[in-house]
Amino acid sequence: MLTRLEVDGFKNLLGLTVELGPFTCIAGENGTGKSNVFDAIQFLSLLADRSLMEAAQEVRGTHGDARDLFWNGYDRGMHRMRFAAEMLVPAEPVEDDFGRPATPTTSFLRYELELGYHPPQGAEKIGRLSLLHESLRHIKQGDARARLRFPHSKARFRDAVVTGRRSGVSYISTTVEGTESVIRIHQDGGSRGQPRPAAASRARATVVSTVNTSDDPTILAVRREMQSWRRLALEPSALRSSDGYTDSRSMGPDGLHLPGTLFRIALHGSPDDPDQVYSRVAGRLSDLSGLQVRTLDVQEDDVRELLTIRLHEISGMVLPARSLSEGTLRFLALCVLLEDPEIRGLVCMEEPENGIHPANLSAMVDLVRDLAVDPQETPGDDNPFRQVLINTHSPGVVQLVDSQDLLFADTSAHRTESGQVTRRLRLRPLAGTWRAADGDGDFVTKLDILPYLEAPPDAQLTLDLDGRAA
């Protein structure tokens, strides 16, 4: 669970700090850079799994040139981007690449990363990213109350997710020795054992991405947590596809393998009676007005070796997934995610209301919110340790989301160290909510967000006080 994100020098994210709860909705106009927050999270996730350049090339908006990731990346001079992520990793064991269990020493951690840019040299045609700084340290249990500011239960939530103690050094540290930055891995036992040093300038990947054994359980747990951060961009063509018997049983970011995923969940959740899972999914799907759902299942076609989702209407009509509307398919995919015990970590979603009829916005917002862990209860099988981050520009969504979960995006003038004035993304909470409780004045009031709360001034159809069209 990502509880705090700090980004500086990545796209238009300059000095950005955002605190995240189990569920967060970022609202703002097109073009402010809301999606850049998702890009930064995705980039960190990719850096925990791939080389620096491989990760850079997969981020939205890059075209093979790492300078696309930096603020003013094509200007002359030194380019740097800095990240800090405070996170809660599950206190339960994770598996290393060899299937061995590894239990982290502590569960509340702060990861810091700084990357630079090296221009092409010699025969090189494009520049490359360089690792300048990397560190990982624990956050003390005594500091957890001040760091986890979102409303939660101490006894049932905080005491369950903030575990372990550690004295002394960080798990990963960076020091400058002469002109060289040296990164060291420190064992989970603290001062026992010799740290393992490596020259940062020669690194082609982050240290976190190289840890794949149970010898460093806390670093491995952080890597697994960051790998679990996913960005959903559900596509109707993918959602309508059937699955072959040999296809993956995990849904992709675009919704591919939805039938196989639901089939796995049904058999895993209730091997003797998979209809129990199908009934729960159908029950949630029936929250959509205009959809007459009786039940739902996955058809097994042994001749063609295909799995296909079928919706059975009250009228008796059977509809395959390819016949459903885009909005229904996206809603169905989220219903399946809600049932999936394998989905943990952070889920980012762009405009989940797309394709949804206004009458069904409430059902969609409730479903997205229910995907996230309830911080008033203990995480477990009935309360999966999941986090959800969405963005929107829909007034309907903003009006339905709890004010505690809202952040409003706009841009503000920013003067750089060189004196240049530019525009940067700003995320501000609503006055009176937990993010605005420190009283620094950087919040919005209802007067600031009137476009989200009222009908537009040129509206042709409104309701009077009696509920009649006017």
Image (cartoon, helix red, strand yellow):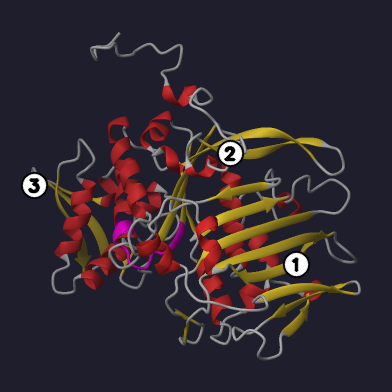
Q: Which residue is mark 1?
A: 133
Residue 55 at what x, y percent from top left?
64, 63
Check whether the beta carbons of the residues at disc 2 and disc 1 lie within 8 A of each other.
Answer: no
Locate residue 388, reporting x and y percent.
Answer: 43, 52
Q: Secondary structure at mark 2?
A: loop
Q: Position of residue 221 (x, y in %)?
A: 52, 74
Q: Nearer the viewer, residue 74 or 284?
A: 284
Q: Give the amino acid at mark 2.
A: Gly
Amino acid at dot 1: His
Mark 1 vs mark 3: which is more N-terminal?
1
Quick check: 217 left or right of 402?
right
Q: Which mark is residue 439?
A: 2
Residue at 50 percent across and 82 percent down: it is: 96
Mark in front: 1 vs 3: 1
Q: Residue furthest bottom?
A: 193
Task: State the image quarter where residue 248 is shown.
Answer: bottom left
In terms of depth relative to the viewer, which is nearer, 161 or 31? 161
